[in-house]
Image (cartoon, helix red, strand yellow):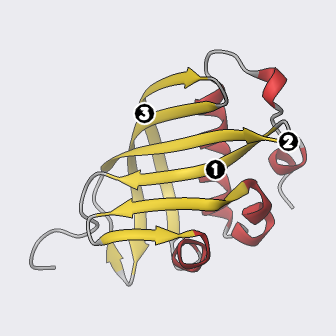
Amino acid sequence: MLAALSSNYYAQETNAGLGEKLTKEFWTVLKSGEIDSFSDRISEEFLALHQYGAGRKAEEIKLMKTIKLGDYTLSDFTEMESGNTIIVTYKVTADEELGGQKINPAYRMTVWQTRNDVWLLTAHCNMTPFFEKGK
């Protein structure tokens, strides 16, 4: 298990930049391929939105397991916190493949909420189509 996973970020630790930290942790897990070790940090009500439609926790975990993430950069972070929710927007540039095709750089939005004083991944949105048209 990754060391970052053993240090759960608790709600009382909120401060500027926490959404960025949580999101970077999530991307570290994606790159490691250890998504099962992170599944308890994904809300049962998790909802994802892609250009082809919405997905729930089980199907999104299955999709995450197909990602082959190489080197990537997360940039252009913007976040806001309201009550028990942090919304983070950012840009991802990656050597990422899904179904054998390279994924385009994309702006994404990730939502975190506290439950029982632990931050849970609640929603994720990919704002750019996965593949270039015709590929």
Q: Nearer the viewer, mark 1 or mark 2?
A: 2
Q: Quadrant of the N terminus?
A: bottom right
**Which residue is disc 3 drawn over?**
75
* View extreme (bottom): residue: 99
Residue 69 position (above or below residue 121): below
Q: Quick check: marks 1 and 2 in contact, CB under 8 Å? A: no
Q: Is residue 10 above or below residue 93?
A: above
Image quarter in which the C terminus is found: bottom left
- The CA distance from mark 1 to mark 2 is 13 Å
| Direction top: furthest residue | 16
Q: Earlier along the polypeptide chain: callout 3 or callout 1?
A: 3
Q: Residue at x 40, y 76 (%)?
A: 98
Q: Secondary structure at mark 1?
A: strand
Disc 3 secondary structure class: strand
The type of residue carrying mark 2 is: Asn
Q: Residue at x 75, y 71 (%)?
A: 36
Check disc 1 and report the residue beneath it: 121
Three-letter code, disc 1: Leu
What percent of the width, then of the height, locates residue 21?
Answer: 65, 33
Q: Is residue 64 left or right of residue 6?
A: left
Q: Is residue 35 left or right of residue 126?
A: right
Residue placed farthest to the right in the image?
Answer: 6
At label 3, the amino acid type is Ser
In the picture, the disc for residue 116 is 2
Q: x and y percent of residue 104 in the render?
A: 27, 59
Q: Residue at x 67, y 30 (%)?
A: 84
- Is 47 situated left or right of 32 in this image? left
